Image (cartoon, rainbow, N blue to C red):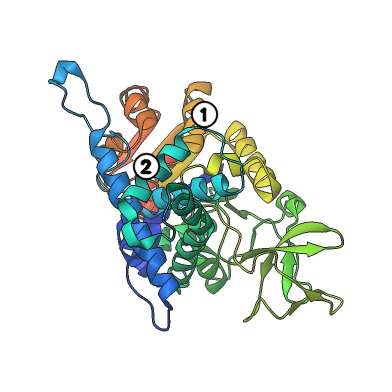
């Protein structure tokens, strides 16, 4: 059989990576050697977080509840680093005239009122423009903290992956992950499990993206990183922008197979964060990799999932469609407290009962790190 193993950020926690809540807290911790500008960005992010968190508690007001608010049902109770990154993106887009809705200006005016001495200028226009100029910097700051945090070595939690990869009952294991870290790759290599990841062989200090490697029939294990990775970079190469995995110590000094100097487009890794990732699914390397994922969902009837909080609306719709396409499509969910997911996702909440009654969704109340193939065999095969 062919299997999709779908992984979210939760599977990386046993190796010491933080939860979304912990990662958000790290945004507000000063770092050694930072300048006053970084402190200013942090304070502005705190203002934005306070505003967004207050908004979460305000929405859903209704006369039938005596004008009390239900709160933003699927947004959690506090703004996360992904929420903050999205809002910073909106500010940055406003700054260059690419804002596509009228809410951004009102939002920025509200932040200006709360920012006090954090913004420069004496008039509203001057202060709004100062805020706008900082939008991109605040987003870059969030990305830098995330990238530094995800530079972690594999510790534990993936033994089940090895069991699946070595099982004679699985002819093809497709590991689909939303994680930016490289723990899965580290684990596979440490266990000498051959796999393809959408990139070719090494040339100089890089491995160029090559979608065709997924068609290698000899590779039983295939890795798909739908949100990118901390070792992916974009380079201007032969007149076009190309994505590559960088294999080296310093991306500022990297050459291709012919020894020619390569220059990373932004000097930062290529991965997706924020809550509007679905827009980016339609461009560049993400178009190809999501096409492969959608093709898998049309071909494969069995999914094993763990660590995913059902917070990506576009992905959720894909699974919702997958469940509807055939009663033969079955998902085994490794989740210690599966009921919590109904509070995070409208798609999961509305589909949960129907999927369970139809025998399409089976919940095993444990995490990936505590699960082993023998106890799952009857559910998967």
**Quarter assignment of residue 305:** top left
Q: Which of 5 and 228 is in front in this view?
A: 228
Residue farthest toward the left in the current orientation of the protein: 66
Kindly indicate whether the residue at mark 2 contacts the one at mark 1 (C-beta within 8 angstroms): no
Task: Say whether residue 9 is visible.
Answer: yes
Between residue 44 and residue 229, name the one nearer to us. Answer: 44
**Disc 1 versus disc 2: distance between alpha carbons?**
15 Å
The residue positioned 37% from the left and 22% from the top of the image is 358
Residue at image location 47% in from the left, 51% down from the top: 88
Which numbered disc flags the more N-terminal residue, 1 or 2?
A: 1
Residue 94, image x and y in percent?
55, 44
Residue 322 disc label? 1
Q: Is 335 placed above or below 301 here?
A: below
Quarter of the figure with residue 115: bottom left
At x 41%, y 64%, the residue is 41
Tag shown at residue 333: 2
**Residue situated furthest front in the rendering:** 122
Observer able to see residue 156: no
Mark on residue 2?
A: none
Q: Which residue is drawn at 44% across and 71% down?
A: 37
């Amino acid at each position: 059989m062919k299997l999709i193993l779908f992984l979210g950020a939760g599977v990386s926690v046993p190796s010491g990576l933080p939860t979304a809540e912990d990662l958000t807290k790290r945004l507000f911790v000063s770092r050694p050697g930072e300048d006053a500008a970084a402190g200013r960005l942090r304070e502005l992010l705190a203002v934005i977080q306070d505003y967004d968190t207050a908004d979460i508690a305000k929405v859903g007001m209704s006369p039938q509840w005596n004008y009390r608010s239900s709160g933003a049902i699927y947004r959690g109770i506090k703004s996360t680093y992904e929420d903050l990154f999205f809002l910073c993106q909106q500010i940055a887009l406003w700054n260059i005239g690419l804002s596509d809705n009228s809410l951004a200006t009102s939002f920025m005016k509200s932040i200006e009122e709360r920012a006090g001495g954090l913004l420069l200028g004496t008039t509203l226009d001057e202060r709004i423009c100062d805020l706008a100029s900082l939008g991109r910097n605040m987003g870059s700051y969030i990305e830098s903290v995330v990238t530094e945090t995800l530079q972690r070595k594999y510790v534990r939690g993936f033994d089940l992956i090895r069991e699946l990869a070595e099982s004679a009952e699985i002819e093809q294991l497709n590991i689909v992950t939303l994680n930016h870290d490289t723990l899965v790759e580290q684990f596979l290599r440490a266990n000498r499990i051959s796999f393809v990841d959408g990139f070719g062989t090494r040339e100089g200090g890089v491995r160029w993206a090559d979608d065709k490697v997924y068609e290698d029939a000899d590779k039983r294990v295939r890795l798909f990183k739908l949100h990118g990775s901390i070792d992916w970079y974009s380079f201007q190469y032969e007149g076009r922008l190309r994505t590559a995995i960088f294999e080296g110590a310093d991306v500022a000094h990297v050459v291709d197979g012919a020894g020619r100097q390569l220059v990373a487009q932004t000097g930062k890794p290529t991965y997706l964060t924020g809550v509007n990732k679905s827009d980016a699914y339609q461009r560049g390397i993400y178009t190809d990799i999501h096409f492969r994922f959608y093709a898998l969902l049309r071909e494969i009837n069995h999914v094993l999932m763990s660590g995913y909080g059902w917070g990506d609306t576009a992905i959720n719709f894909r699974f919702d469609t997958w469940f509807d396409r055939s009663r033969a499509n079955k998902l085994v969910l490794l989740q210690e407290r599966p009921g919590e997911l109904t509070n995070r996702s409208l798609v999961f909440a509305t589909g949960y009962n129907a999927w369970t009654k139809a025998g399409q969704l089976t919940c095993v109340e444990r995490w990936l790190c505590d699960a082993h193939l023998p106890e799952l065999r009857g559910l998967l095969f």
